Amino acid sequence: MHLGDRVVQNTSEATTNAQDEALNANCGAPATNASVWYKYSPHVDRNVVLDATASSYSGGMLVFRGTPTAGSLVTCGPGTVVLRARAGKTYNIMVISDTNVIGGKLVLTLKKAPPPPGVRVSVARRGVAFRGGAARIHGTYFCNHGEFAALSSHLFQLAGRLKIQAESEKRIQCDARRHRWSVRLVSPIGTYARGHAVARVRIIACGLLACRHDTTRRHVFLVRAPRAQRQPLLSPSTTRMERPRPLVERQGHWPGS
């Protein structure tokens, strides 16, 4: 195969054997049916994506550097895998059906991996304090080349002897556009006061190969919300999410199965 190739092949008569099963020892695919093989030998170092998701059946790839053995496996997974290919090395790619379905229409592409995500985040100077213990802060962010992105925020205020703080986290779009963000945070002690507070906001985005983040910290001034908006909120807005990781580290669910 070469960079940019799109291979379409009928694999309904392809077979598997004990060698395929042995090569799968460190990968854990549930099946190795309808195995077919390809080679890739780049002239320069490249990060590439092998994608079989357009096929008519569920499958994936096991990629070996040099002679295929359980020890020469460099990456594997269902659907899509990312390969950090080195110049002058030969990579043998075994494409399989990972179910009892014996192949079908295989559609396999080899393309350049996208660059790591780019992220930026800002926080506005003013926020709003609501009666009932909530506060709202806002700002803007930019994110591109991310398959997964999240924005987390933390707001701290010292009011007399009270240390008031809350945090929140939510998924966001990563579409190479500038967006406005806004979060409402609820103090667990039931109050946010008019006055100064400290906001810390972090955006993180993960692509196929890496995660990138940007963090900003600034003093904000909380103003009182108009009376019509002073509605109590009864539960904290804290939301815990699984921290994202590069997708190359969590591709599919074969390894360790």
Image (tube, rainbow, N blue to C red):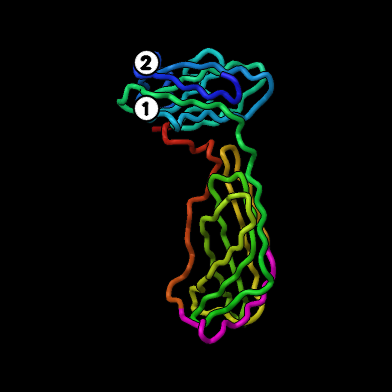
Range drawn in magenta: 217-232
Q: Is residue 219 magenta?
A: yes
Per the image, the residue denoted by label 1 is 98
Q: Is residue 22 magenta?
A: no
Q: Position of residue 248 (x, y in %)?
A: 54, 36
Identify the element where label 2 is drawn: loop
Q: Quadrant of residue 86?
A: top right
Which label's residue is closer to the chain start, 1 or 2?
A: 2
Q: CA distance from mark 1 to mark 2?
A: 13 Å
Query: Does 174 sit left or right of 250 as displayed?
Result: right
Instruction: Name the residue at 55% across, 26% down.
Output: 110
**Residue contact between numbered discs 1 and 2, judged by CB atoms under 8 Å:** no
Q: Is residue 4 above or below residue 157?
A: above
Circle 2: is it few (<14), some (14-19), or many (20+) Cα within 10 Å? some
Residues 136 and 74: in front is: 136
Residues 86 and 36: in front is: 36
Q: Position of residue 118 (x, y in %)?
A: 66, 47
Per the image, the residue denoted by label 2 is 14
Identify the element where label 1 is drawn: loop
Which one is closest to the eye, mark 1 or mark 2? 2
- Amino acid type indicated by mark 1: Asp
Query: Does 235 sit left or right of 138 as displayed?
Result: left
Q: How many marks?
A: 2
Instruction: Name the residue at 50% across, 22% down.
Output: 7
Circle 1: is it few (<14), some (14-19), or many (20+) Cα within 10 Å? many
The quarter in which the N terminus is drawn is top right
Q: Is residue 116 above or below residue 85?
A: below
Q: Which mark is residue 30?
A: none
- Amino acid type indicated by mark 2: Ala
